[in-house]
Image (cartoon, rainbow, N blue to C red):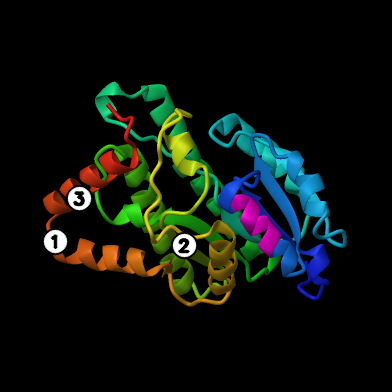
Amino acid sequence: MSDNLPNAQKYFLITGASSGLGYAYCQVALDLGYSVIGVSRHCQSITQTLKKRDAAQTIIALDHDLSNQQQFDALIAQIKGYHIINLINNAGIGYVGSLATSDVNEQLNMLNLNINALVFLTHYFVQYFQTQGINGRIINIGSIGSFAPGPLYATYYASKAFVRDFSNAVNYELHKAKSAVRVVCIIAGQLKTNFLIKANHQQQTVVKFNASAMNVEQFAKCSLSKALKTKKANLVFGWMNKIWLFYAKIVSRKRMMHHCYSYQKQRFKAIE
């Protein structure tokens, strides 16, 4: 495939595209002149809303529940034939609450989405980009929570630690193999989306955004612009997130867990 095609014939594949950060990334990709393939459980609505912004590019919405591994091959079958040059693995969910009182099936469902789907798509597109001669970027959405254990968010924080370490290791493999394909992990902090409500099992909880919570559209524009050009494996945005990262490096894990536990209790007043 030729990279000499106009941008409108080049596609971003973006998971978790129906709302929040994924939807914002679709907007940014379109603003950059590219076409978009959006994937989520209920994705059809984005076709009309995004078309109102950008009528020139192609917008394809695919309904797939990526927490279900049986849908992976069906997704690949649908996207074959499109000139995909970048992948954004954004799909992910959280689960707040103590492990002892949680629904284990919801925890496992989260791991399927946050880890298994990301590994599958990263593996597929590393091979695809290399065989097609595309200098593609695989952008995996991590979390500032990946740098410490997270009581009351234990499985989610652990899944994001996997995302970061996995992304960094694969990117290093590609670098040593002298491949032009790159895997970048965006370390996201708190964004002003409905992610936290979903993480608390749709309860009408009073969710407290901290002062450093970022506007999702601004974050998408800034993070994607840098991720497409950076030579770094990880990108951290926001002054509070950088302070948190520094703090995680200098204090004990026990102290970090105490801080995380207290922080989550304050954010979700309805927990336990």
Instruction: Label 3: state its secondary structure.
Output: helix
User: For residue 102, what is the image quadrant?
Assistant: top left
- Looking at the rendered structure, the kind of residue marked 1 is Val
Highlighted magenta segment, given as a residue range: 22-28
Q: Position of residue 2 (x, y in %)?
A: 79, 71
Foreground mark, 2 or 3, reads 3
For residue 181, above or below residue 51: below
Instruction: Label 1: state its secondary structure.
Output: loop
For residue 41, above or below residue 174: above
- Give the residue displayed 63% in from the left and 71% down from the top: 135
Is 11 or 192 nearer to us in this picture? 192
For residue 94, above or below residue 25: above
Foreground mark, 3 or 1, reads 3
* Disc 3 and disc 1 in contact, CB within 8 angstroms: no
In the rendered image, which residue does mark 3 sit on? 259
Does any portion of residue 243 appear in the rendered image?
yes
- Give the residue displayed 38% in from the left and 59% down from the top: 211
**Residue 38 within the segment the image draws in magenta:** no
Q: Position of residue 24 (x, y in %)?
A: 63, 56
Placement of the N terminus among the 4 image quadrants: bottom right
In the rendered image, which residue does mark 2 sit on? 186
Q: Residue furthest right?
A: 56
- Looking at the rendered structure, the kind of residue marked 3 is His
Q: Which mark is residue 251?
A: 1
**Residue 26 within the segment the image draws in magenta:** yes
Does any portion of residue 81 appear in the rendered image?
no
- Marks 2 and 1 sit apart, C-alpha to C-alpha, by 23 Å
Q: Report crowding for label 2: few under 14, some 14 to 19, many 20 or more residues within 10 A (C-alpha).
A: many
